[in-house]
Image (cartoon, rainbow, N blue to C red):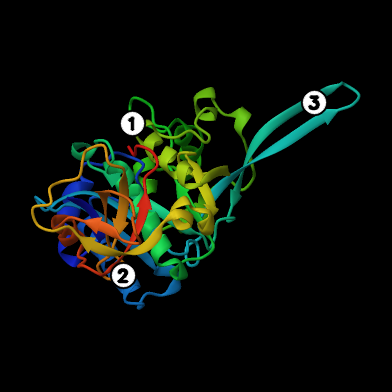
Amino acid sequence: MIVVRVVQTGDVDALVALAQETGPGLTTFKPDRDALAARIARSRRTMEDKAAPHEAGYFFVMEDTATGDVAGVCGIETSVGLEQPFYNYRVSTVVHASQDLGIWTRMRALNISHDLTGYAEVCSLFLSPRYRTSGVGGLLSRSRFMFLAQFRERFPQRLCAELRGHFDENGTSPFWRAVGSHFYQIDFNAADYLSSHGRKAFLAELMPRYPVYVELLPQEAQDCVGLTHNDTIPARRMLESEGLRYENHVDIFDAGPVLECHIADLRTVRESVVVPVEIAAPGAGSAPQDRPKSLVSNTSLGDFRVGAAAGVPQDGVFRLTAEEAAALDVKAGDLVRVLPLKHKQG
């Protein structure tokens, strides 16, 4: 069974190997052993209520329980921008008009913004290409919302997600080339690395002091504002199906869109239910392939696990096979959170 679980200290080697498969633009998951070990330690401190508010965050891994292979990661930051500023561009509209000349223009402007300070953030989503088959990506991404629903009291009211922006066929960000490179005088990957390691002072010191008029940029850079990387489009669709929306904030490096919503409005928070587990008797056989599926998680903070299982809650219980129960670390009578899947998840 493929499950998403909270990260453990022993996962660091597998995570370093997995991070080698990422491309440019994934700021929060780099193949840096020390940084990944620190991320794991921070996640464990958060679950033990030993993390300061500005550093609290959770990190999850996707594991194939049959092989032990770590196939993906995802994370949740509890409250961004409390210590290091959380910078975005806010895309606003500027109107210039002359009554005498009968001329009226409407332009987009990018303004440095701290609007999302204090939001929770879903981040660090990466799935190995080896596991990009139907349903797996949806499980990985939506597992975070199962965690948010189960431990709602540990998070603020609002949530955001920064999505990777557009890169051209050479792996370069046209927006960075037109804007950031002129101000920061370093390449995208260097700026990305510094930012991902919390060294963000250079942003405030070097970023543009005044609004950037989008229409003054080269056309290929204009087209990048709010544009999602091709590899991230499925993740965006899933986030939007959960209730997150683009509200005119974009990333300061690649102009990728930022989605946001109230956590209480997430579909998983509204529609998931908590019911007891019933375990099928040995030899009961597997469920029919056309049976509807649900996401199912245990309710343990320290060993949270979520996977996909056939069926929906019936008669006030959810039925698991013995193998599924073992993978989710639950026994008969334990409570599980269940979200019936209405649509095919990709």
Q: What secondary structure is found at the residue carrying circle 3?
A: strand
The residue that mark 3 highlights is: 104
Q: How many marks?
A: 3
Question: Around disc 2, counting alpha carbons within 10 Å, would you say few (fewer than 14), some (14 to 19), or many (20 or more)?
Answer: few
Question: Quarter-wise, where is residue 239 in the image?
Answer: top left
Q: Position of residue 301 (x, y in %)?
A: 31, 70
In this orientation, which residue lies closer to the viewer: 148 or 71? 148
Q: Report if residue 198 is visible in the image.
A: no
Q: What secondary structure is found at the residue carrying circle 2?
A: loop
Q: CA distance from mark 1 to mark 2?
A: 39 Å
223 horizontally vs 58: left or right: right
5 horizontally vs 103: left or right: left
Q: CA distance from mark 2 to mark 3?
A: 57 Å
C-beta proximity under 8 Å, tags 2 and 3: no
In this orientation, which residue lies closer to the viewer: 36 or 139? 139
The residue that mark 1 highlights is: 171
Q: Position of residue 47 (x, y in %)?
A: 32, 72
Asked if 32 appears above or below 156 in the picture, the reply is above
Q: Residue at the right extreme? A: 100
Q: Position of residue 302 (x, y in %)?
A: 27, 71
What is the number of the mark on residue 301?
A: 2
Q: Residue at the front extreme? A: 315
Q: Amino acid at mark 3?
A: Trp
Asked if 33 appears above or below 137 in the picture, the reply is below
Q: Position of residue 322 (x, y in %)?
A: 14, 58
Q: Report if residue 103 is visible in the image.
A: yes
150 horizontally vs 209: left or right: left
